[in-house]
Structures are given as C-alpha cells and as structure tokens.
Amino acid sequence: MKSYKIAAVPGDGIGTEVIEAGVEVLHALAEREGGFAFDVETFPWGADYYMEHGQMMPDNGRELLKPFDAIYFGSAGDPRIPDHITLWQFRLNICQGFDQYANVRPTRVLPGVKCPLAGVGPGDFDWVIVRENSEGEYAGVGGRAHQGHAHEVGIDVSVFTRDGVERIQRFALELARTRPRKQLTLVTKSNAQRHGMVMWDTVFEEIKSDYPDVTTDKMLVDAMTARMVLNPKSLDTIVATNLHADVLSDLAAALSGSLGIAPTANLRPEGDFPSMFEPIHGSAFDIMGKGIANPIGSFWSASMMLDHLGETAAAARLMAAIERVTAAGEVMPRDLGGEATTRQVTDAVIEAIRAAND
Ligand code: NAD
Ligand code: MN
C-alpha cells in the first residue's frame, strides 16, 4: 500500500490546533478511501522551540524536511517574539529555502457560508490567486542605518528578476488554461513603480502569446481591490507580486466569508523540494488555546495537498465532506456564525467522510 510521508509543522497558536485536526481528517480519509496511508511525522518547532534554543527551527531543519512528500504547516507567530523573527526564521525559511515560488490561493464562497457582499453567494465567484513567493517585496534585501537616532533610515528593496517573473507568470498562465474560464488577470502597480513593475508588464506581453487559449487582462493593484468587491464575478485566475497578492488574498479570504476558511499551497512545481500546504490565517492570539479555531482552512489546505500528491479522488471527497457540513449549517464554527468548537467541526467532517456512500 502506498504511504505518503507528511511532515506536520504545526508551529504556534491555533496553528497547533488546526493541524492536529487536519491530521485526524487525513487519516480518516485514507481509511475511507483505501489504497494509501499517511505516515505523519510532527516537528514541534516554533515559539516554544525558540524560547529553549534561541531559534525557531534547528539549523538542519530543512534537511530534515527534504525527504518528505509534503509539508503540512500551521502558523508562525507568538506574542513573546517579534513577528519578523518568527516569519523569517520559520515560514519564509522553509518557503524560500525550498524555492516554493508559486503560492496558490483558491477562493470561493462555500455552500451555507455568508459572503459579506450583498447579493453574492456560493457559486458566484471562483478565484485562484497566484502569488509570487520567492522574491519581490519580501526578498529580504535592505537595511537600517543610524539606528535610534532621529535621522534613522529603514530601507526595503524589492527584487524582481526576469526569471522569477517569467516562471510565476507562466505557472499562472498554465493554471488558467486548466480552468473552465481560461482567464488570467495580471496585477501590478506599473504607473507608480516604474522599474520592476514595468518589467512585470513587459514580460507578460512577451509570453502571453504562447497561451492563445487564455484570455488575459491587466489591473493596477489599487483598482483591483475595488473590482474584487464591486465585480467579483468578472475575475477568475489572478497573478501578482509577493506583497500585492498577500494583501489581495486576505481580502479574498474575507470575501469568502472568513479568514478561517482560506487555504494555500506553496508549490515547488519542479518537485526537487517538497511543497508546503497551510491555512492562510495566522496564530490568532485572541482565540488560541480555547479550542474554537475554525479548522476548515486547514482541511481545505489538506485537500490541496492531496491534489498535489495525485490523490484527486480523496481531495474531492474531502472538499465534498467540508461542503456537506457547511451546507447543513448545524455544526458551524464561531467565525462562520455558529458555536461549534474545533473538535465538533472536525468530528462533523470526519462523519461526512465516513458517511459518503460512493
Ligand atoms: P490572524 O490570522 O492570526 O488573526 C486575524 C483574526 O482572524 C483574529 O481575530 C483571529 O481570531 C481570526 N482568525 C484567524 N484564523 C481563524 C480561525 N481559523 N478560526 C477563527 N478565527 C480566526 O492574523 P494576525 O492577528 O494578524 O496575526 C497573529 C499572528 O500570526 C502574528 O504573529 C502574525 O505574524 C502571525 N501570522 C502568521 C501567518 C503564517 O504563519 N502563515 C499568517 C498570518 C499571520
Ligand atoms: Mn498574509
């Protein structure tokens, strides 16, 4: 029987709660599906590890992760440690170290979930935001001088390489091609940022003719926020820089009903390093430890992981189980207007997986 090696990296805050729930769901799914199993190893890295060892993960952390088929990540971030340390030493260390350059974020309103936009509901929009995940505004290039003095400066430099731009745009064009509408929107800010962003536009103009079956258009990022809110049905696949897509995808998550639902995949399409799957949300300090986090973002991320592993039937079964629970509306987590705990939502989804009679 096929056994997938999964590295579970729960991290901090509610990350630990939703990944534990997700691992249970994965095992239930393998049992229901038959033919494969998950061999899950958990790496207890993050804030507690930092308090003991002075770093978020060990020096050889990526070496330990490399042999796995996929990484299932929770969240990095703890009230005791500055966010830029937790993020860079942990999540970005893995994403950038494994050159997981394609960050993929599907968004739609699940049945039974209320979209905050009036007159918009399930089935009305179905987006995939593709975020450049290896460079750009989060390249980590910059510095500070005259620290603590009145004339202190802080500089963050955006790094855009032609290779980096071309590979993410081609990835997005290929992805758009596999979707029913075959439509891709390029998002930049090439009016105000007249170097790297103009290069994004130029590269897009050069390569898009290789995909004549894909309909394309372009938006400035500020106008894009308005279009997402005012005309969500007009969008399908979207590609943008690291920063722009980070912001747009939080907006997208909110429009889908809650940040607690939204999933993401950090893909290494070449497969020479493992890809990583995680809910979009963070550690949620306000609710951590209470057992009330919505685990659906973690489950949807697990479904993306199954797709990536080639277990498309199991991926679809998991999404169907999630949707059966949200559509029924009886067991809804708090962020979706219900009162259910993480445990109750997890049990309901596992029940739906077992009950499926196909
Ligand atoms: P957050 O996503 O942790 O929380 C934002 C709000 O959404 C909170 O009110 C929270 O309760 C709610 N929320 C988020 N996920 C939820 C869920 N599954 N169920 C119910 N409610 C949920 O964002 P933040 O407050 O900006 O960040 C908190 C910490 O998490 C920070 O340290 C930040 O750096 C970190 N963070 C990490 C990641 C990551 O690792 N990918 C992403 C975002 C934030
Ligand atoms: Mn974000």
Image (tube, helix red, strand yellow):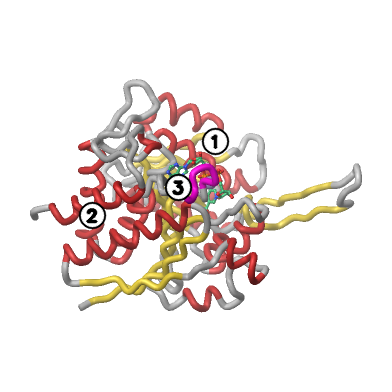
Left or right of 54 on screen, residue 69 = left
Which class describes the residues within 10 Å of circle 2: few (<14), some (14-19), or many (20+)?
many
In the image as oriented, which residue stretches furthest toward the front? 290
Please report whichever mark, 3 or 2, sits nearer to the chain's N-terminal start.
Answer: 3
Residue located at (62% from left, 60% from top): 88
The quadrant where residue 194 appears: top right
Residue located at (54% from left, 67% from top): 45
* Distance Cα–Cα, label 3 vs label 1: 37 Å
Residue located at (86% from left, 46% from top): 152
Please report whichever mark, 1 or 2, sits nearer to the chain's N-terminal start.
Answer: 1
* Distance Cα–Cα, label 1 vs label 2: 40 Å
Which numbered disc covers residue 350? 2
Is 223 rendered above or below residue 203? Answer: above
Left or right of 290 on screen, residue 152 = right
Residue mark closest to the camera, 3 vs 1: 3
Residue behind mark 1? 221
Residue 144 x, y percent position in the rendering: 81, 53
Residue 169 x, y percent position in the rendering: 47, 52
Is 244 rendered above or below residue 42? Answer: above
Q: Amino acid at mark 2?
A: Ile
* Distance Cα–Cα, label 3 vs label 2: 21 Å
Q: Which residues are magenta?
A: 284-290
Residue 282 x, y percent position in the rendering: 51, 49
Please report whichever mark, 3 or 1, sits nearer to the chain's N-terminal start.
Answer: 1
Residue located at (74% from left, 55% from top): 142
